[in-house]
Image (cartoon, rainbow, N blue to C red):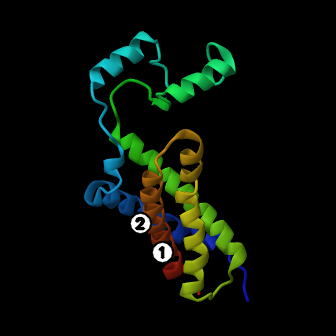
Amino acid sequence: MHDVTMPMLWLPILLSAVAVMIGSSVIWMALKYENAEWKVVPGEDQLIEAVRKLNLSAPGQYLFPHMMGEGGAQAATRKWEEGPVGVLLLRKPGKFSMGGTLFKSFIFYLVVSFFVAYVASHALSVGTEYLRVFQIAGACGFMAYGFALVPEAIWFGRTWKSVCKGLVSALILGCLTAGTFGWLWPR
C-alpha cells in the first residue's frame, strides 16, 4: 500500500476540471433543463428603472423585506406576510464578459478538483480499483457542486424544483470528476 501524493494527481485535477467545464457547457447550452428556472420579469424595463431610482446600482445582495429595515422586526413581519418577498442580486454594470466568466468558472472547477484530489489522496492508495476511486471522487464532486443549493432554498427562496435540477447537474459533474480520477488514478 503506497501513499498517493498531490503531485501524482496533477493530471486528473486538470482533466477533470476540463471535463466538468465541457459538461457544464453541455448542460447549459444543449440540454438547457436548468434554463427554464430563470424567468423573465414582466415589465423588466420598469423594474430596472425602479432599481436605478433606489440607487441600487452598486453590486450586492439585497433581501426584502429586511428584518433590520425600516420599522423594525414587527413591520418586517407584516411585510413578509403581505409580500412580495425576495432576494435581489446585483452585478456590476458594464459589458458582460463571457470569456472572463468562463475563466472564473474553470478556476472554480480546478479548485474543486484539487480538493477532490486532496480527500482521495488521503482515503485511497496507489493501485486502488476504478470503482472505489469513482465512489470517493464522485461523492466529493457531487457535494462540492450541489450541496450549497439546499441552503439557498431553505433561507433565500430558491425553488426546490430549481434545487433538484441543480442537484442533477451536480451529479453529472460529480460523475465526470469521478470518472476522470478513476481513469487516471496512479497504478
- In percent of width and height, residue 21 lies at 40, 59
Dot 2 amino acid type: Ala
- In percent of width and height, residue 159 lies at 46, 47
Within the image, what quadrant is residue 13 found in?
bottom right
Within the image, what quadrant is residue 96 found in?
top left
Residue extending farthest top: 53
**Left or right of residue 40, residue 82 in this image:** right
Q: Quick one: SS at disc 2?
A: helix
At a point 28% along the width and 54% down the height, the residue shown is 29
- Mark 1 is surrounded, within 10 Å at the Cα level, by few (under 14), some (14 to 19) or many (20 or more) other residues, namely many
Dot 1 amino acid type: Thr
Q: Quadrant of the C terminus?
A: bottom right
Relative to residue 159, is residue 48 depicted above or below? above
Q: Nearer the viewer, residue 10 or 63?
A: 63
- In percent of width and height, residue 148 lies at 57, 52
Distance between the Cα atoms at labels 1 and 2? 8 Å
Within the image, what quadrant is residue 186 found in?
bottom right
Q: Which residue is mark 1?
A: 180
Badge 1 vs badge 2, beta-carbon distance below 8 Å: yes
At a point 55% along the width and 72% down the height, the residue shown is 138
Q: Quadrant of the N terminus?
A: bottom right
Please indicate, yes or no, whether residue 61 appears anywhere in the rendered image. Answer: no
Q: Nearer the viewer, residue 45 or 106?
A: 45
Q: Which residue is mark 2?
A: 19
Q: Quick one: SS at disc 1?
A: helix
**Left or right of residue 144, residue 32 in this image:** left
Relative to residue 52, is residue 66 depicted above or below? below
Upstream in sequence: badge 1 or badge 2: 2
At a point 65% along the width and 73% down the height, the residue shown is 120
